[in-house]
Amino acid sequence: QVQVGDLMLIRPGEKIPTDGVIEAGESAIDESVATGESLPVTRVPGDAVIGSTVNHQGLLKVRATKIGKDTFLSQVIKMVEEAQGTKVPIQELADRVTGWFVPMVMVLAVMTFVAWLLFPKIMGAAGLALGDLLPWLNPSLSGATLALYATIAVLVIACPCALGLATPT
């Protein structure tokens, strides 16, 4: 078990077990797990290193400065958990609106399907009057096909609104 102040010997290819400071040696360290940096970073004596990063080349002597929940990665995990546990006001509003918006769109889609299925002539006549707005309306199609097309149109039109309400979780 590593303690603060312990001197660790890190060989090439090994993970650095905890945050520390290089006392001796020089190496390229893969910090991608911690920083997202795609290229290894050269570290020399006196430089801080982050636990869970990988020593690529040289032999390093690292003095442990932080362990357990005090390490850099533990702090990052803690901040992410805290951020995920709280909702911003816009997210709460979006949740409330979505709570009634999505069911209303589904009810409207079902009503559209039923209306076009039960009253294809009336709906078709109304649709033909709006000819340029409904290019998919073809009087030679069956009532079920027209009902399906109209239902899909309602869902597609409502979709951008639902996507606009989406907030990251």
Image (tube, rainbow, N blue to C red):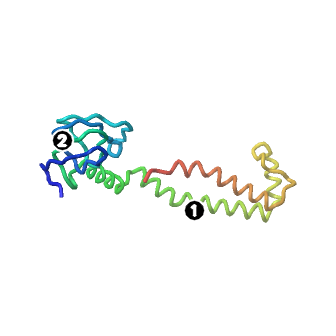
Q: Give the residue type at disc 1.
A: Pro
Residue under numbered circle 1: 103
Asked if residue 40 is positioned above or below residue 107 in the image, the reply reads: above
Circle number at residue 142: none
Q: Give the residue type at disc 2.
A: Val
Task: Between residue 159 and residue 5, name the one nearer to us.
Answer: 5
Which residue, as the protein is rendered here, is positioned at the far left? 5
- Mark 2 residue element: strand
Circle number at residue 21: 2
Which residue, as the protein is rendered here, is positioned at the far right? 140
Asked if residue 103 is positioned above or below residue 28 in the image, the reply reads: below
Residue 42 placement (x, y as % from top left)? 28, 34
Task: Between residue 149 and residue 69, name the one nearer to us.
Answer: 69
Which tag, 1 or 2, sits closer to the chain's start?
A: 2
Residue 121 placement (x, y as % from top left)? 84, 59
The residue shown at (21%, 55%) is 68
Q: Are marks 1 and 2 in contact (CB under 8 Å)?
A: no
The residue shown at (84%, 59%) is 142
- Determine which quarter of the picture holds residue 102: bottom right
Quadrant (top left/top right/bottom left/bottom right) for the N terminus: bottom left
Quadrant (top left/top right/bottom left/bottom right) for the C terminus: bottom left
Separation of marks 1 and 2 at Cα, in angstroms? 57 Å
- Determine which quarter of the picture holds residue 116: bottom right
Residue 35 placement (x, y as % from top left)? 33, 41
The residue shown at (67%, 63%) is 110
Whether residue 57 sits left or right of residue 5 in the image: it is right
Whether residue 97 sits left or right of residue 118 in the image: it is left
The residue shown at (42%, 55%) is 92
Task: Between residue 148 and residue 104, name the one nearer to us.
Answer: 148
Q: Is disc 1 surrounded by few (<14), some (14 to 19) or many (20+) residues within 10 Å? A: few
Task: Between residue 121 and residue 45, name the one nearer to us.
Answer: 45
